[in-house]
Amino acid sequence: MRIDFYLSVLTVLALVGCAEEPTTVTTTTTTQQVTTTGAAREVLVTQPPPPVRVETQTVAPRPGYVWTSGYWRWTGTTYVWVPGTWVIRPRPAAVWVEGHWVRRPGGWTYVPGHWR
């Protein structure tokens, strides 16, 4: 009896994955991959990022946390706002360098935030 129950649940779960998703075709010409030296790649976006949002910085959860501001992330077709957050400092002398968009010939590229 119990085995039959588990088999029927597994069958239902297996069939859920068989549902056909609607086909969506999106065409965009707003990005291009630019190969840089080493293993790093940067994405060149031809449309400028929106203005940075002004965020309300909350109180740090505990000592040793650093506020990282929000930023606009490129999805391949549009910009999406990623809100700021608190992160723990990896070592006492570490300094957070904010990520930012930089104008390059032909578009903009994002320089991610990092610890220094």
Image (cartoon, rainbow, N blue to C red):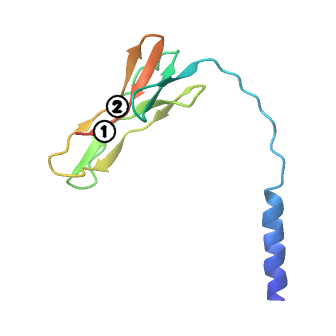
Q: Position of residue 74 (x, y in %)?
A: 51, 28
CA–CA distance between discs 1 and 2? 7 Å
**Residue at image point 80% right, 44% down:** 21
Labels 1 & 2 near each other (Cβ < 8 A) = yes
Task: Give the answer, above or below, for where 37 lies relative to 106.
Answer: below
Question: Label 2's element?
Answer: loop
Q: Give me the disc on residue 13.
A: none
Residue 57 visible from this viewpoint: no
Q: Quadrant of the C terminus?
A: top left
Q: Tag 1: residue type?
A: His
**Residue at image point 40% right, 33% down:** 38
> Viewed as shown, does residue 67 lie left or right of 9?
left
User: In the orientation shown, which residue stands out farthest toward the front?
Assistant: 38
Q: Position of residue 25 (x, y in %)?
A: 76, 29
Viewer-closest of 22 and 53 = 22
**Residue at image point 84% right, 75% down:** 8
Q: Position of residue 43 (x, y in %)?
A: 49, 25
> Which label's residue is closer to the chain start, 1 or 2?
2
> Viewed as shown, does residue 86 lie left or right of 13?
left
Mark 2 nearby-residue class (10 Å; few <14, some 14–19, many ≥20) = some
Mark 1 nearby-residue class (10 Å; few <14, some 14–19, many ≥20) = few
Q: Which residue is mark 1?
A: 114
Q: Tag 2: residue type?
A: Gly
Q: Which residue is mark 2?
A: 99
Question: Label 1's element?
Answer: strand
Number of numbered markers: 2
State the image quarter where residue 75 is shown: top right
Viewer-closest of 104 and 2 = 104
Q: Quadrant of the N terminus?
A: bottom right
**Residue at image point 79% right, 71% down:** 10
Task: Give the answer, above or below, for where 75 lies relative to 85.
Answer: above
User: In the orientation shown, which residue stands out farthest toward the bottom?
Assistant: 1
